[in-house]
Amino acid sequence: MSHLPNHETGALVKRINRIEGQLGGIKKMIVEEQPYDEIIIQLNSARSAIQTISKLLLEAQADHSLMNVADGESLDNEMKKLQKVIKQYNRMN
């Protein structure tokens, strides 16, 4: 994906696994009828973690596009790919 360690597939999968754990904990809180404010705190934490992964993927795409252009790929094609990722990223925020 990218040459940066936090963009590697393994690192991203670890982040996703943590989020899955968070969501499981949130589900348990709901089942146990924990206070809503505490549940919302945990939901915000999970949302923040998802946004972080989204940012890392955006960075990875930018890095990937720059490396591809340096290797002779079409600048126009790489710009289109990057613009598509930026558009999706902006929909999250």
Image: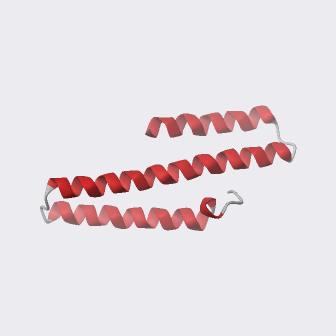
Outermost residue to the right = 72
Q: Position of residue 15 (x, y in %)?
A: 48, 63
Q: Position of residue 50 (x, y in %)?
A: 44, 53
Tell me the quadrant of the picture where the C terminus can be found: top left
Q: Residue at x 72, y 60 (%)?
A: 3
Q: Report the number of numbered marks.
A: 0
Between 42 and 12, the one lying in front of the other is 42
Tell me the quadrant of the picture where the N terminus can be found: bottom right
Q: Residue at x 28, y 66 (%)?
A: 25
The quarter holding residue 79 reads: top right
Looking at the image, residue 50 sits to the left or right of residue 76; the answer is left
Q: Residue at x 65, y 47 (%)?
A: 61
Between 8 and 48, the one lying in front of the other is 48
Q: Position of residue 10 (x, y in %)?
A: 58, 68
Looking at the image, residue 48 sits to the left or right of residue 62; the answer is left
Q: Position of residue 55 (x, y in %)?
A: 54, 48
Q: Residue at x 83, y 41 (%)?
A: 73
Q: Colour mode?
A: secondary structure
Looking at the image, residue 62 sits to the left or right of residue 46; the answer is right
